[in-house]
Image (cartoon, coloured by chain):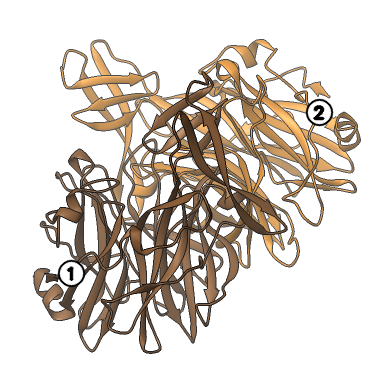
Chain colours: A brown, B orange
Amino acid sequence: MIRYSKNPVVRPEDVKPSAEGFKVVGAFNPAAVKFGNETLLLLRVAEECVKVKNKIRVPAYKFVNGDGIPQVLEFDKADPDVKLKDTRGVVYKGIDFLSSLSHIRIARSEDGVNFTVDDKPFIYPQNEQEKYGIEDARVTYIDGKYYINYTIVSENSWSTALSVTEDFKTHKRLGVIFYPENKDVAIFPEKVNGKYAALHRPNNSGFGKPSIWYAESPDLLHWGGHKCVAKPRDNRFESMKIGGGSSPLKTSEGWLCIYHCKGDGQRYTLFAMLLDLNEPWKILKRPEKPLIEPEADYEINGFFGNVLFTNGMVEENGRLWIYYGASDSCSCLIISTVDEILKTLK
Amino acid sequence: MIRYSKNPVVRPEDVKPSAEGFKVVGAFNPAAVKFGNETLLLLRVAEECVKVKNKIRVPAYKFVNGDGIPQVLEFDKADPDVKLKDTRGVVYKGIDFLSSLSHIRIARSEDGVNFTVDDKPFIYPQNEQEKYGIEDARVTYIDGKYYINYTIVSENSWSTALSVTEDFKTHKRLGVIFYPENKDVAIFPEKVNGKYAALHRPNNSGFGKPSIWYAESPDLLHWGGHKCVAKPRDNRFESMKIGGGSSPLKTSEGWLCIYHCKGDGQRYTLFAMLLDLNEPWKILKRPEKPLIEPEADYEINGFFGNVLFTNGMVEENGRLWIYYGASDSCSCLIISTVDEILKTLK
């Protein structure tokens, strides 16, 4: 398990803004997939507005005929109606505005380490359900098609929507598959017991803490048979919540999942976990120690320091490229093998 | 629209406890259905423990071979580890215990107003997912079978499960259809655009307020195509949240829904709403004024005063029996007609 020596593989400054007056502050939490000879990263690109003296500028979208048109909204800092919410938002006359909004952009590479980022967005907010942006994609290849799920954020909170593509040039929206509040959806690459399968992460505001659940579907569009798979354990790594990573990887020993934990001090680490091949709601192995925790400078410092988050993994002949977002800022890479990760589970 | 003169139609004292040491404190929020010559109410029966001096007793279940066995847990009031959470719970050494737990019991009537309550529970907690009880059933008759959805509460928060019955003596569990946090699920009595349909109520903890959503399903077990239908409006009735009622009633003008609102001062009122017949995620009519608000003594005073909640409605030849829970205590009835309710929507 080695961090790639030239991490990060994509940084915010490698990405062109999607609009004039916008500034890219994050190119992180990439989905990853092998497509032809290339490795594609589906980056979450977060954009703020370019700063102006005495003003607060926030990005927004106007929706016209099914297109999202980026906007720069400007408030006077002295305006008593303007209230800073936290580092991530502004409230103006009771209405929420985020200081940064995300969309999905593709980065392409022939060697898995040197990436060129597309000039234009791939999945861009298009309707009121996506008003506050599109975040944290996962790609799953099933029967010749690439299914992409992602978090959509709006005044209706956050939920998970699905798109499908065959060429990574265009995609087709298939609707909201997990209603609010749900994110960290990871679709399995094949049917289990005759049904499509996914891990998902409902929110908890009453009893319990946000946990990883299992669901099944006849068609990838309608989901049911919900079962809780893994709850946060009572330790410093998982004390706040946990959530699934990329599409689970089938190995001879079980479904390999790498998931993220939010622990004490809002620190995010990555853990490996092995699920039963036939009953993936059953955990076979779940080590006490993280696979990786924030150590490198780019993992400790950034938009939100001490955050590791993975939603993209590529396997080829037993070799494993684990892509991950660091500090809500950049995209990084761990190079390993399936065998090596499985050994950490013993 | 007349409140039945002998309201409540079922009171806690009409119901036998499910175990020794238990005391029935609520027989409320009934689902309602015509079955043969009888009207059945599927009551939410809430039970506390009989009080004992200097002790705190809470109800619980032990799960053995798929059966829930009721238990009385006893704590010493002087024990510093015992913390009262609010009127509804106790925390002992970090573990939550509810002061009351619910199950579903059937009350039967030949005239829709005089009910006899079964001695035994109908749907009783059976596994860890139902550890904190079963609440607020809805019944929908589809193709010769009665589908019953209900809220299950556990350490994984609250979600919605489905059962099916043909005789209201036994029922078969079909699994969790809406993951946490979701309740107030109302399944339509027929397919819409070739799919089964339901209203549901996801929770919001970030942006927005708990709202009524629409979902569709090929088989009643797997749900998708989620769309937000109705959000709480900015008025004193709906300021906190709204949620669907019984299975929507098909009328010539649209799907008639009676929903509940939680407003200022935690006061619950009932509103009528008309949804488009072919696109039930579109609202045709939604009046400004409630259909009914807490006025009668049994609506104002009780376990939780000023709460009206409906999840059961029976229609026959245009006559309408709207059953509702009052003050989280008893079950009440409004007698009306479809025409009369539709008139209130003009």
For the question of whether residue B15 can be seen, the reply is no
Image quarter hosting the N terminus of chain A: bottom left
For the question of whether residue A201 can be seen, the reply is yes
Q: Is residue A190 above or below residue B57?
A: below
Image quarter hosting the C terminus of chain A: bottom left
- Asked whether, in this view, residue A174 is left or right of residue A4, the answer is right
Disc 1 is placed on an element classified as loop
Q: Amino acid at mark 1?
A: Lys
At a point 32% along the width and 76% down the height, the residue shown is A278
At a point 20% along the width and 83% down the height, the residue shown is A319
Q: Is residue A337 above or below residue B130?
A: below
Q: Quadrant of residue A175?
A: bottom right
Q: Residue furthest front?
A: A53
User: Which numbered dot is residue B335?
Assistant: 2
- Asked whether, in this view, residue B45 is left or right of residue B115, the answer is left
Disc 2 is placed on an element classified as strand
In the image shown, does A232 or A36 lie closer to the viewer?
Answer: A36
Chain label for disc 1: A
Chain label for disc 2: B
Residue marked by disc 1: A6
Q: Nearer the viewer, mark 1 or mark 2?
A: 1
- Asked whether, in this view, residue A198 is left or right of residue A74, the answer is left
Q: Is residue A245 above or below residue B149?
A: below
